[in-house]
Amino acid sequence: MTEYTQITVDDSYVARLTLNRPDKRNPIGPATCGELVHALGGLKTNRDVRVIVLTGAGTVFSAGGDLAAMAQPAAEGVSHASLVELLTEMHELGKPIIAMVNGPALAGGLGLMVACDLVVAVDTAVFGTTEIAVGLWPMMITAEITRSVGRKKTLEMMLTGRKLGAAEALACGLVNRLAPAEQLEEMTMALANEIADRSPAAIALGLKSFYRSQDMEFEPQLRYLQNELGRVLALDDAKEGIAAFLGKRKPVWKGQ
């Protein structure tokens, strides 16, 4: 079993990935990216895992990039990966990732949160692209944030570095749901289990088509989605879902 130094992994039905450097506010550097990529690879091939919850240890989700690691030459080896590799792996996973945001999600931490498919956040959390305060710009996470938040709001965040409260983050589309601290776990797991009860085969095809088609021109997108619809209809799970609906019973998914 792989031993991680930056994260912890629980690979149950609803798996849990936890950024585990609370003393440093769960920073994201090459080592963290590498461990997340490795762990996601294992969860991807584990047929028993239906949904993944990503969270942070302590009282912070992630305060952003590991500035100390950025100031050093990039390390090489299988334990390190770039943010490009991590975000690509997340979108190619074929299993839903829910961010359970237990505290501030800032800079690269915000990008990691937005890269998740869904976000449930504590109602006291703050969010922001704070890089400009130290003379940096949120280059990599631009690709994530601009696909979730409008252009004007995104640029306001990036140019000012201002932190958004939870209600504002909900209103502009950064998060899906807010929860009081004492209900965060319960609400996140309720959502995760609801999704885990759906067809894993349909979800895998649906997530792939969602991310791959988002930047296509309209007609090519329709043609691509038409083809993907055919693949969904050919699934055993689709046949089972229709039969269960007509028979007024709960479907039994095969995952294929």
Image: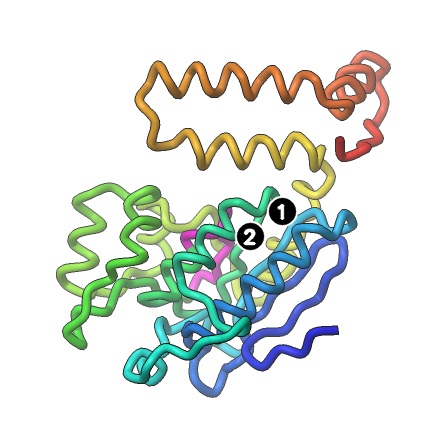
Q: Quadrant of the N terminus?
A: bottom right
Q: Earlier in the sequence, mark 1 or mark 2?
A: 2
Q: Secondary structure at mark 1?
A: helix
Give the residue drawn at x 56%, y 51%: 97
User: Along the horizontal axis of the image, is 15 left or right of 177?
Assistant: right
User: Along the horizontal axis of the image, is 68 left or right of 236?
Assistant: left
Return the x and y of residue 124 as percentages of the image width and height.
42, 66
The amino acid type found where label 1 is placed reads: Leu
Mark 2 = which residue?
A: 98
Please tell me which residue lies in front, 165 or 13.
Answer: 13
User: Along the horizontal axis of the image, is 178 left or right of 109?
Assistant: right
Total number of numbered discs in the rendering: 2
Q: Residues within 10 Å of mark 2 (few under 14, many from 20)?
A: many
Of badges 1 and 2, nearer the viewer stands 2
Q: Is residue 31 above or below residue 68?
A: above
The residue lying furthest to the bottom in this view is 23
Return the x and y of residue 62 as percentages of the image width and height.
43, 71
Mark 1 = which residue?
A: 191
Give the residue drawn at x 42%, y 50%: 175
From mark 1 to mark 2, how far is it between C-alphas?
9 Å
Return the x and y of residue 230 as percentages of the image width and height.
61, 15
Q: Which residues are magenta?
A: 114-124
Task: Identify the image quadrant of residue 36.
Answer: bottom right
Do the CB atoms of the residues marked 1 and 2 lie less than 8 Å apart? yes
The residue lying furthest to the front in this view is 76
